[in-house]
Image (cartoon, grey):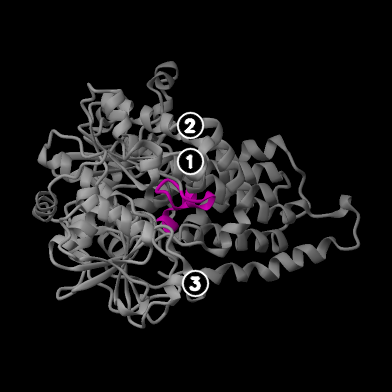
Amino acid sequence: MASKPGILTDWPWKPLGSFKYIILAPWITESIYSIMGKDAKDWDYANLSIIPFMLWRMLHNQIWISFSRYRTAKGTNRIVDKGIEFDQVDRESNWDDQILFNGILFYLGNKYVPGASHIPIWRMDGVIIAMLLHAGPVEFLYYWLHRALHHHYLYSRYHSHHHSSIVTEPITSVIHPFAEHISYFLLFAIPMLTIAVTGTASIVAYAVYISYIDLMNNMGHCNFELIPNWIFSVFPPLKYLMYTPSFHSLHHTQFRVNYSLFMPIYDYMYGTMDKTSDTLYENSLKRKEESPNVVHLTHLITPESIYHLRIGFASFASKPYSSVWYLWFLWPVTLWSMMLTWIYGRTFVVERNRFDKIKAQTWAIPKYRPQYRLKWQKESINNLIEDSVLEADEKGASVLSLGLMNQSEELNKYGEVYVKKHPKLRVKLVDGSSLAVAVLLNSIPKGTTQVLLRGKLAKVAVAVAFALCQKGIQVAVSREDEYEKLDKSFGANTEGKLVMSKSYSSYKIWLVGDELEEEEQRKAAKGTLFIPFSQFPPKKLRKDCFYHTTPAMQTPVALENVDSCENWLPRRVMSVWRIAGIVHGLEGWEEHECGYTISSIDKVWDASLKHGFQPLRIPTQSKS
């Protein structure tokens, strides 16, 4: 929002929220009705192409969003180092409003503008006219409009909304108040109206012109340099006719320079070009891929979870992951992404963060949760994890933390197999178990005297149970095999605090993990607090009970570039398995934390608090 919002700031359909596309219904209905009972040769293909073209524009923009986030996470040719935060993602979540606005105007133009309906697919003269009109009056008028928008009166009421984003993303290009979009469309309409009234319009001319505008807008705000300098060496005048991402990035960091739309010629003519434009361009091109200090290795969960990655849908990724109905309409894209991950078959970078002296990256294994449960996938997954460990070691990373199912007893003995296979590893493997235990111990309400332990007895569960017994808290298990396993592991050190119990309703604190059955949840007493010790949360069946998050902590404000949620966790909350790697790197610890050993729980907990990570509040009400 601008600092002093002016009239026509909000889009007219803002009150409709996610139902805003309903306003297209009359136009689509009329379009379908217009072809009923007619031969195909009499159809108005310009009218019929409006919706497909809107979908193309959305796809085009999304490709740029994903590509930009991937490239800036890796660091290659990145222009501005500073990250973005949730407020920018929220502010830019309505990037599709301008596509909706343009779609309505295209329907109106098709219906009322002479020469805009029943146009041919291709006419060369119309394309040339549109190009010349854009290069001439559109670029010139935009330059002066843009300078006018930087006058304090218009800037404070309108254009400051766009400049709230110092670090730009492709969709930043279309984040303007409604009034600004009206003025921009009037400019871009000059070539489109001209070719319509002169009878030279074609479907391709309109499609190419708008796609060109989208392309240049997205490119100019992508925050990485991609225009090779040989292009300007071959044709030097091109520097006056085509801007670069670094050229426009300076407009967002310096504000009163580089006003041009896509052609810098007017900045050269009127003395508003930033003198560091060429230097920034050259430096950005020379910038190599960033080498992280800490790597967190995660994986995909479900086929739809690809959209929740930071390189997926920005707005969707900025909220805790949940299955939403509209993703079912994207099943062709989902299937294509599954095929792509299968063919590509390599770990990929999804996120970067900076904290103090640490440069952290999150890498994702292109495998889904169900695949980790298949024995015939074990070798393939282990090879991917091993390759990631070796790549992190080669890049000079000091720590690699294993997230989600990348560490388990069945798969890799909690990461120990890689350490034994590569004894000269410089990168330290961290499974985060000690911090997970510390967080769980501090999540149990004070004054608790007994807990029920239910779920698969993995490394963390065993360690928590032992620590609770040592603290004098009774730990009950409901199955004999679990009791025997724990009793054998603890020896005589439980002081009688490990017990067998079939009475589920006697316990108000449940520590739960994988393999917790729905029937068991239903046996819990009203008001029971479920505290997960596994990487995945239990299904929330009880509205009269409380559910804590999987082991996680609140991140400090100093942690930069946090603009997406880690799976189902709230904003600015990280899993302990990810935090453990960051803390390990900050402290400079030289030992691995993997296999069947656990680091000092108190040492890791104190170090996490020292660096600003905070425990989460115990939930006061359940959510179904």
Label 1 Cα crowd, 10 Å radius (few <14 / some 14-19 / many 20+) = many
Q: How many marks?
A: 3
Q: Amino acid at mark 3?
A: Gly
Q: Nearer the viewer, mark 3 or mark 1?
A: 1
Q: Are marks 2 and 1 in contact (CB under 8 Å)?
A: yes
Residue at image location 88% in from the left, 50% down from the top: 41
Confirm whether residue 141 shows in the render: yes
The quarter of the displayed image where residue 247 is located: top left
Confirm whether residue 80 shows in the render: no
Q: Nearer the viewer, mark 2 or mark 1?
A: 2
Residue wearing tag 2: 380
Label 2 Cα crowd, 10 Å radius (few <14 / some 14-19 / many 20+) = some
Q: Does residue 149 sit above or below 125 in this rendering?
A: below
Residue wearing tag 1: 367
SS state under label 2: helix
Closest to the observer, 181 or 507: 507
Q: CA distance from mark 3 to mark 2?
A: 44 Å
Q: Is residue 553 magenta?
A: no
Q: Amino acid at mark 2?
A: Ser
Q: Does residue 425 sit above or below 8 in this rendering?
A: above
Residue wearing tag 3: 17
Q: Amino acid at mark 1?
A: Lys
